[in-house]
Amino acid sequence: MSRVYQLAPSILSADFNRLGEQIQRVEKAECRWLHIDIMDGMFVPSISFGMPVVKSIRKESSLYFDVHMMVKDPERYVEEFQSCGADMITVHAEACRDLAETVKKIHETGADAGVAVNPDTPLSAVTDVMDQVEMILIMSVYPGFGGQKYIPESTERIRTLRRMLDEKGLDLKKDVIRHCNELSEKYGYEKLRFLEGDIADYTGVNKVDMVVTLHACDTATDFALYNAISWDAEMIFSVPCCQHELNEQMESEKLHLMTRYGIIKERFAALTTDAIRANLLECCGYKSQVLEFVDLSHTPKNLLIRARKAKISKEHKQKLLKEVDAMCKEFQLKPLLYGLLQVDEGRNTDAFRTGK
């Protein structure tokens, strides 16, 4: 994935007798960002400048203003700085009473939000807002003074953060997410982070190596598999649970025996759900297996769908798709995963369509 790099000169190093002239030089050099350091003498020892300066230079420049607020309780000032011309407001994780609420407040003003972390602050301090901000600033010096030497360890912190942004776990329960992040930090898994969110509408990535789902309830597994296919995952490991979707749809005159008795229908529907999922994965270019995840004595939700990218012939895809169509026709089924793949026009499911 290609990345865009921006150079953001800081006016902290400018000659304030010639500030307007030097900002023009930045524009002529075709820089697009201007970094504006705000210091309050409380969060950091120094005092720099405030809203009047930002408002004044906004009138003379169309650059993107990244306002870096090295101030205590920055949520008090976000509205004023946005109204003075800030395009992005970057706050320190260490300075906020509630970082997530501060980020939300910044976005409500219409500005982009950034979060900064000091050299001694664990990167886990920004885990909960990583997917909510437009920028994370890794401080490579201690805030408060210009002209300091670069802290060499900052390079590895940047690498770690990049990996953290690429490796994620999702769950809807805040307590689960908090506990998982605590364990990740406790055992030194700095590359792994967990987020509160719904896999059905998660858009934080567009290419992954592997997707793992554990007891994603009912159709949450279908959304996870669909996203895994769309993200072109090399490997998929999925342990489904609570497969209610087809149980509610399943009817058959010829095979009413399988739907007459509630408990049999429920189990048959669960197995049918996972068989269809495995077939559809093969239709999308994966070699699928359905295995016993753990012994049945530990949990009844013990099936694992394992899939890896492979070359699947068009004839084999067509055969498996016909099996799915036949099952759906006989039991009047409309599996969610099948529907998602059928209507998809813009994501990476060409392999599925060629199976028809």
Image (cartoon, helix red, strand yellow):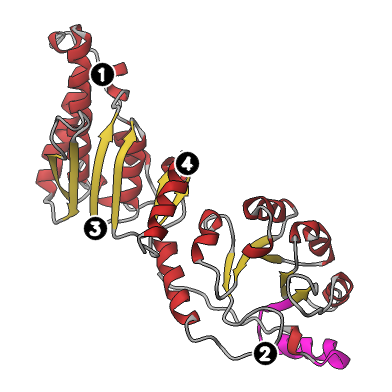
**Label 3 – label 2 distance at C-alpha:** 43 Å
Q: Using the image, determine if residue 333 lies above or below residue 324.
A: above
Q: Residue 175 got which mark? A: 4
Which numbered circle lies on residue 50? none
Cα separation, mark 4 vs mark 3, equals 30 Å
Q: Determine whether the residue tagged by mark 3 lies in a helix, strand or loop.
A: loop
The x and y percentages for residue 17 are 88, 92
Q: Earlier in the sequence, mark 3 or mark 2?
A: 2
Residue 314, percent from left and from top = 13, 48
Residue carrying label 2: 29
Choose the circle earlier in sequence order: 4 or 3.
4
Query: Badge 3 is on which residue?
Result: 234
Picture quarter with the C terminus: top left
Place of residue 65 in the rendered image (x, y in percent of width and height, measured from the top left): 73, 72
Q: Nearer the viewer, residue 344 or 57?
A: 57
Which residue is located at x 81 percent, y 64 percent? Answer: 81
Q: Is residue 309 left or right of residue 36?
A: left
Circle nearer the N terminus (4, 1): 4
